[in-house]
Image: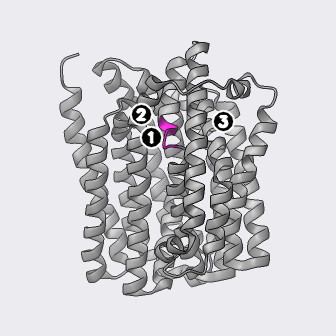
Amino acid sequence: MKLLKTTIFSGIITFVKIASTFVASKVVAISAGPAGVAIVGAFTNFITISQTFANGAINNGVIKYSSEYNGDSIKLKTLISTSLRITIYSSIISGILLILFSGFISSIVFMNELYVNPIRLLGLTIVLTSCNTLILSVLNGLGEIKLYTFVNAIGSIISLIFTVTLVYFYNVIGALYALVFSQSIILLVSVILLRKKAVLRLFFNVQPIDKTIAANLSKFSFMAIISALTMPLVQIIIRNFLIAKVGIDESGYWQGMMRISDGYLMLITTSLSTYYLPKLSSLKTNGELKTEIYNGYKVIIPAVIVSCGLIFLLRFLIIKVLFTSDFISMEKLFIWQLLGDIFKICAWVLAYLMLAKAMTKLFVITEIIFGLSYIIITYFCVIKWGVLGASIAFAINYFLYLLAMVIIFRKKLSKNE
């Protein structure tokens, strides 16, 4: 599976996801304004955290070992059976906790208890979402990129339909319900689309949990939990801090900027997750790793720089098309956010080595350090520059993260084979 081929298929996924996400954002922006965008963003972050715990945080491990065991049917069946059991058990526990503590969670995530019912619904349906995520991880690891692309694209379209419909009838609360419903329905779609494929039959070969495979997956679980907790929690903290310091509308501008950033970078991040993780996992020598990273930079970095340049030049049009005229003040955030995005992707090309090679300790340390530094830098920057300071802090933090990745991996990859 070549990087260019993967990027093309990733581009298809990304186009559909971006279109779906931005249409949904436009509907929410028109219906509920900047405050509604901030609320939906908070719930999106929380769902990311919840889903990570609900599937046992094993997705990256499943991708890695599915890639390694491709061709060995016995090991592959054992991997999938063990992963499925872990996913179901973790989902049940997570669902119960979400239902029992829905009021407390709502007060933390939304700063009030008005949204307990969407959280309870998430608890009831999260096992369905987790099983679908597991299926997609296996498709990714096995290199079934066409199937992976198709299932993802259909899922994004379904999510868009639910969002537009429920926001039309129920405003912001409808958007929250849509986030939960659409994720659950996608499992049914995946099963229908894959019903005649050999990969789906692997999930019906139920075996006891294999302790060795479970132990290997646990290394990735710890990294995934730290990753899933760090950035969404950091964004929740920053969002609440912005609401307290500059108001919920200003927080909505920042959330809108983050959505634009996440949207156009989805092509790059999807390529990294679908290509780099299984590819880097399969490479054994430092020479091979350095060559692959160099080739990745030749394709990815020019694409990011060109994208950022175009987005900056078209920023006023983008705001009007994706949001409303109420969001025009967010244009001042673009330059720093886009600069931070360039630093972010440059760093991530290197950072994926930590996932591919299960560098658990290093991954955890860097995630925590730079999560905390983002909060601290944001605090001082917002005090000085208001909401603009949040974007400045984003750029500063990812520049420091890139420096750290370069120093760490220059030393590691320069060692003898």
State the scheme by which the image is colored.
Answer: one colour
Residue type at mark 1 is: Ile
Q: Nearer the viewer, residue 338 or 42?
A: 42
Q: Nearer the viewer, residue 271 or 372?
A: 372
Q: State whether residue 174 is above or below residue 264.
A: below
Q: Position of residue 239 (x, y in %)?
A: 43, 74
> Quarter holding the C terminus?
top left
Residue type at mark 3 is: Tyr
Which secondary structure, mark 3? helix
CA gap, disc 3 to disc 1?
21 Å
| Residue positioned 39% across, 85% down in the render | 244
Residue pointed to by mark 3: 148
Few, some or many residues within 10 Å of mark 1 (<14, 14–19, 20+) = many
Q: State whether residue 163 is above or below residue 59.
A: below
Residue pointed to by mark 2: 296
> So how many labels did they put on this image?
3
Give the residues in magenta. Answer: 56-60
Q: Position of residue 159 (x, y in %)?
A: 72, 57
> Quarter holding the N terminus?
top right
Q: Nearer the viewer, residue 336 or 83?
A: 83
Q: Nearer the viewer, mark 3 or mark 1?
A: 3
Q: Nearer the viewer, mark 2 or mark 3?
A: 3
Which secondary structure, mark 1? helix
Q: Position of residue 372 (x, y in %)?
A: 28, 62
| Residue positioned 48% across, 80% down in the render | 111
Residue type at mark 2 is: Gly
Residue pointed to by mark 1: 300
Are the residues tagged 2 and 3 within 8 Å (C-beta)?
no
CA gap, disc 2 to disc 1?
6 Å
Are the residues tagged 3 and 1 within 8 Å (C-beta)?
no
Which secondary structure, mark 2? helix
Are the residues tagged 2 and 1 within 8 Å (C-beta)?
yes
